[in-house]
Image (spheres, rainbow, N blue to C red):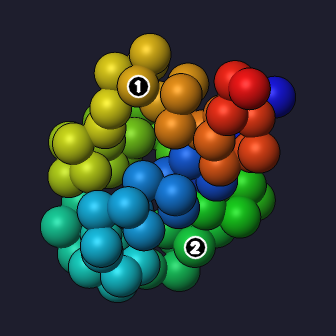
Amino acid sequence: MKVSLGKQIKAIRAIRGLKQWELAEKADVRQPTLSEFEHDKVRPCEDTLERIKAVLDWPSDDQAEIAFGILAGDDGR
């Protein structure tokens, strides 16, 4: 099951223990804009997405696939 980009951002932010406003501040994004990203209303441009990923220490594709599979209820069993 594919997890949307917004849900991925929100999930990794929560795993990292950051509030939405904290991520927004650290990634130099307005908090309402970050909320729109997390709710899949707007997709961030590549530059903004790279800043968000850097702040969140975004996991590798393999790690993300495992984590999001578990979040989606597919733990491989």
Left or right of 11, for residue 72 = right
Find residue 11 and report its horizontal and vertical position in percent. Answer: 52, 58
**Left or right of 44 in this view: 27:** left
Using the image as rendered, state which of residue 48 and residue 61 is in the foreground.
61
The residue wearing badge 1 is 63
Q: Which residue is mark 2?
A: 35
Q: Residue at x 21, y 42 (%)?
A: 57
**Residue displayed at 71% across by 64% down:** 39
How far apart are the two marked residues, 2 and 1, measured between alpha carbons? 24 Å
In-front residue for pair 39/7: 7
- Find residue 61 and report its horizontal and vertical position in percent: 44, 18
The quadrant in which residue 36 appears is bottom right
Q: Which of pointers 2 and 1 lies earlier in the amino acid sequence?
A: 2
Q: Left or right: where does residue 26 sit relative to residue 8? A: left
Q: Quadrant of the C terminus?
A: top right
Q: Position of residue 31 (x, y in %)?
A: 43, 79
Does the image show residue 74? yes
What's the residue at 67%, 34% (across, down)?
Answer: 75
How many marks overall? 2
Residue kind at label 2, given as amino acid type: Ser
Given the image, on which type of amino acid does mark 1 rest?
Answer: Gln
Q: Secondary structure at mark 2?
A: helix
Vertical relation: 9 (above or below) 47: below
- Judge whether 45 appears above or below 52 on screen: above
> Which quadrant of the rendered structure holds the N terminus?
top right
